[in-house]
Amino acid sequence: MAIALRKPNEIEKLRAANEIVAGALNLLRENTKVGASLLDLNNMAEKYILDRGAKPSFKGLYGFPCSVCTSLNEVIIHGIPSIYKLQEGDVIGYDIGTELDGYFGDAAISVAVGKVTPEDEALIACAKDTLYHAIENIKEGMRFKELSHLMEQFILSRGFIPLRGFCGHGIGKKPHEEPEIPNYLEGGNPKSGPKIKNGMVFCLEPMICQKESKAVILENGWDVVSSDALRGSHYEHTVAIVNGKAEILSVVRD
């Protein structure tokens, strides 16, 4: 399937959907405190999204039961909100999607609850720094595999490894579109495969493991952990290629 090239008016519609995602994530970050329940945080973000005329696009997507993926400690992605109350030293990941006027938004953050260990601080920083390093280095004409390779090398340079089996993706009139964008190089040749072009819109989402990269899905059918059973982290932005560079759509404009 061809990778869609979006017109400027479509990019603005995608920006509007993603601004709501960013606002909801900011709200969750501000309310990430000891004693806050994951289900209450989910409901808070859902209300924020609905109040702005959008839909929480994850709710019901592939059967997911809630509006926010709340990935706690060892859960790297796709965590289901529960009545669990956050405790000092937890690491919590939030992943949110929206639909507004037929266009989709998607972004994620990992947040420390109170004071965490230096190791956990480094884990969270790896996901965030990998994401921004990749975005800063995107240029029109580079290949998506080069981008995957760049992210993998950055993650490895921090002493961590990327989760395998899950990836970033295109986004537009569907929550997941072509291309798939792993956080590691597949196939051995970064100079192969599709090139990045102006008008493309996609999500980059580094998912970080500590010792083993194999993904394990838990009994609820959603929570994804590493086979090493250690904590992970996750960050994500939706970006559009405009004038040869990546522009982040999933931020709140001043």
Image (cartoon, rainbow, N blue to C red):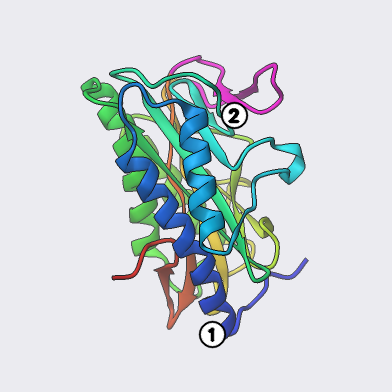
Element at badge 2?
loop
Determine the main secondary structure of the stretch shown in magenta: loop
Q: Position of residue 115 (x, y in %)?
A: 21, 23
Q: Examine the image and state in which quarter residue 100 appears.
A: bottom right
Depicted 210 relative to depicted 6: above or below: above
Query: In the image shown, does 54 or 192 lie closer to the viewer?
Result: 54
Query: Looking at the image, is mark 2 or mark 1 earlier in the sequence?
Result: 1
CB atoms of marks 2 and 1 within 8 Å: no
Q: Position of residue 135 (x, y in %)?
A: 39, 61
**Closer to the eye: label 2 or 1:** 2
Q: Residue at x 30, y 29 (%)?
A: 33
Amino acid type indicated by mark 1: Pro
Query: In the image shown, does 181 or 121 lie closer to the viewer?
Result: 121
Real-space CA distance between mark 2 and mark 1, rounded to the nearest whole angstrom: 35 Å
Q: Position of residue 156 (x, y in %)?
A: 38, 36
Q: Which residues are magenta?
A: 212-230
* Residue ID for mark 1: 8
As drawn, the label of residue 139 is none
Is 22 magenta? The answer is no
Q: Quadrant of the C terminus?
A: bottom left
Q: Is residue 47 visible?
A: yes
Element at badge 1?
helix
Q: Residue at x 37, y 26 (%)?
A: 91
* Residue ID for mark 2: 80
Q: Residue at x 56, y 17 (%)?
A: 227
